[in-house]
Amino acid sequence: MSVFSVEIFLVVLGLALLCLEALVPTIKRHTLATLSISGVALAFVLFLFASKSAADLPAFVQPFHQLDTLAVFYKGFALVITLLVLWLTVESSAYLTKFTPGGNYSELFSLPIIVCAGMMWMASAKDLVTVFVSLELVTVSFYVLVAFARKSNLALEAGVKYLILGALSTGVLIYGIAWVYGATGAMSFEGISAALANTATSKQAALLGAALILAGLGFKVAAAPFQMWVPDVYQGAPIPVTAFLSVGSKAAGFVVLTRTVEAFTANGSIIASEVQALLIVGGSLTILLGSLPAIFQTSIKRLLGYSSISHAGYLLLALGAGSARFDLNSGGVVAFYLATYLPMTVLGFLVLALLRANGGGEDLRDFRGLAKRSPLLALVMTLALASLAGLPLTAGFMGKLFVFIGLVDQAAWGALACAVIGAAVGFYYYFRAILAMYTSDAQTLEPIKLSLGTKAGAIALAVVIVVVGVYPKPLQQLLAPNTVAVATH
């Protein structure tokens, strides 16, 4: 069995669940949840045992599909985050029922599976056409997911903003692809890098196309100056969708960005220095525009939105630095950072979902006294926020450390200063939330009861944060660029 078979299985599963919900309206949500989670878990098991060689792919797929280390990692990443989002949807059932017509949110169990298939295809894309088709499959699905809580005005507002700005960014991306094709005569990443090494290629046309593509992808990853949609969309979207946007959509955007930047900055590229400068400047600006406004946020969801912008800045700096250390190239550092970002972000949104399910809100004051209501939730949320801040001995610290060392290697001192400022400011707003959890009001607070599955999931995510922070070597070895399986055609 090839990896492509797993992706087809996911598409069939997502469409089957959609049809099942439409044709059997009396089906229980619990049944759909069980089918979706079991299906994705089965797909993950099949993925682990599937052939990772491009030679085993169907012949019609091989010209458009690559299976190197990064592709395999991001495919597994997509399956893991989809599984966690489906779990979050189950944990958010009490909240979702209030804001959906008839209390029906069955599509939230099928659409993420289709998004997962699109993310897996993006990870293996070898040309800009495949990138665009896969990206639009993901983006259009997110248009529906963001506005899914139709009884919420915030959700409808978020959906409209995301749709309008997403359509605009798609237009910019297409225009950039057209310019790059006109300048290089190629759509594949390999062909583009070869054309850019030719001094006869028009540098001005290629640079304009590259800038437009980076702008279009910048919207997808919430990079400045295209990040203004993030706080409103994060606040309005349902909690599981926000988590999916924060981790899944960001990872999908960065795997494409990694492939694109590698093509633009390959050896001998006539636009390499300009592209790297754009990434360094854009990353520095993104960190500042994400970190500084977060100081004034009282909504935890908006705070996590600005936090997501800031983390996108660190990822851009990792790409821009282009250094190779710790057995990782720049793409490997980005993948490592995203792997550390996954458990702490999902854990943060899990606590938010449980608070909403128990009658709380998403404001900072709703976190007051959480340590008394549920010591376990307060503990894991503290760990998640500390890791997001970059506290030593947590996964978040290792991700930031690799970025800082890469900037030092390239002597990018201005960018390093912005990164340090962002990290320092992050300690303030993250630990302000931690302080609120351990500050109790005078009134009696109802304890939060957690199921055994919820406790096990929260503890597992917390353990991953600590283990990767203390011993990151296995993850580094997984991402080392030593396994490449390229189809010949």
Image: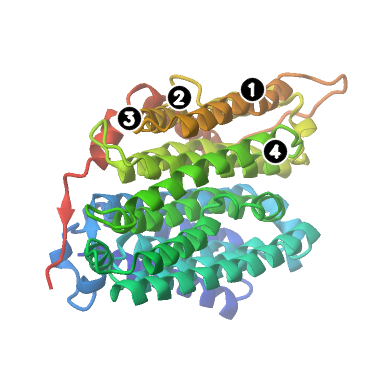
Residues 147 and 307: in front is 307
Tag in front: 4 or 1? 4
Q: Earlier in the sequence, mark 3 or mark 1?
A: 1
In the displayed structure, 472 sits above or below 350; it is above
Identity, as a three-letter code, of the amino acid under mark 4: Pro
The first of marks 4 and 1 along the sequence is 4
Q: Which residue is mark 2?
A: 394
User: Residue at left 51%, top 60%?
Assistant: 215
Q: Earlier in the sequence, mark 3 or mark 4?
A: 4
Q: Nearer the viewer, residue 64 or 184?
A: 184
Alpha carbons under labels 3 and 1: distance apart: 42 Å
Cα separation, mark 2 vs mark 3, equals 23 Å
Give left or right: position of 456 versus 447: left
Q: Mark 3 — residue? A: 409
Residue that numbered label 1 is attached to:
375
* x and y, in percent, of residue 263 in the image: 29, 58
Q: Secondary structure at mark 2?
A: loop
Name the mark on residue 103. Answer: none
Q: Locate the C terminus by quadrant.
A: bottom left
Disc 1 from disc 2: Cα separation: 20 Å
* Quadrant assignment, res 309: top right
Q: Which residue is the site of mark 4?
A: 293
Residue 269 in view (yes/no) = yes
The amino acid pointed to by label 2 is: Thr
Q: Secondary structure at mark 1?
A: helix
Under mark 3, the amino acid is Asp
Q: CA distance from mark 4 to mark 1?
A: 30 Å
- Residue 56 image position (x, y, % from top left): 15, 66
Give the mark nearest the N terminus, 2 or 3: 2
Circle 2 or circle 3, nearest the eye? 3
Which residue lies at the image location 66% right of the left edge and 43% below the top edge?
A: 353
Secondary element at tag 4: helix
